[in-house]
Image (cartoon, rainbow, N blue to C red):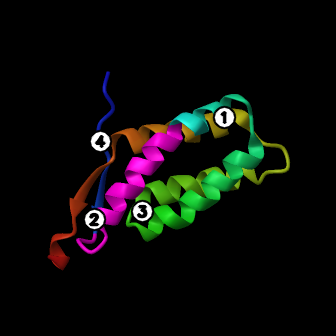
Amino acid sequence: MPQSPIEEIVSPNLIELTISYLEYQRKEVKNKKADLKMRDLPALKIWAHQLKGTGASYGLKKGGKLAETLEELLQAATPEWGAIDSICLTLFSYFETVELKLNEEET
């Protein structure tokens, strides 16, 4: 069953950059799936931290919030892999289904 798309409202000034960013992250998902399978904590920490900052700066507030949650989970003294798996799968789905809408107030 296909996942419902998530909408993100993006500034017209950022739309081209955000599209390029999403294309890059969609390619990265394959690598991150492998990192998750291998339980590569350092690689996942770097990805989560980068997503938290870059996602929000490109107008991807929901994606940035998911990344923030993942980063917090990864920083735990004893990582809870069930929760990490769940949020990673949510992020993977997010990047596969997110749809961009222009912020009409800025057009």
Report whether 95 appears left or right of 88.
left
In the displayed structure, does residue 84 sit left or right of residue 5?
A: right
**Amino acid identity at mark 1:** Leu
Q: Give the residue at mark 4.
A: 5
- As helix, strand or loop, the secondary structure at mark 3 comes to helix
Q: Is residue 8 left or right of residue 77?
A: left
Task: Name the residue carrying label 3.
Answer: 61
**Could you give the CA–CA distance between mark 1 and mark 4, rounded to whole angstroms?**
23 Å
Q: Secondary structure at mark 4?
A: loop
The Cα–Cα distance between marks 1 and 3, rounded to whole angstroms, is 23 Å
User: Quarter-wise, where is residue 4 in the image?
Assistant: top left
Mark 1 and 2 residues: CB-CB less than 8 Å, in contact?
A: no
Looking at the image, is mark 1 or mark 2 nearer the viewer? 2
Identified at 41% across, 44% down, the residue is 95
Q: Residue 66, position in %: x, y?
A: 52, 52
Residue 83: image location, x then y, percent: 65, 38
Span of residues in magenta: 11-29
Q: Nearer the viewer, mark 1 or mark 4?
A: 1
Say which label, 2 or 4, has the lower sequence index: 4
Rounded to the nearest angstrom, the CA distance separating label 3 from label 2 is 14 Å
Q: Main secondary structure of the magenta part?
A: helix
Please tell me whether residue 28 belongs to the stretch shown in magenta: yes
**Mark 1 = which residue?**
36
Estimate the spatial distance between the alpha carbons at disc 2 and disc 4, rounded to whole Å: 18 Å
Q: Is residue 37 above or below residue 103?
A: above
Mark 3 or mark 2: name the one nearer the start of the chain: 2
Query: Looking at the image, which residue is at 76% across and 54% down?
Result: 75
Classify the position of the C terminus by image quarter.
bottom left
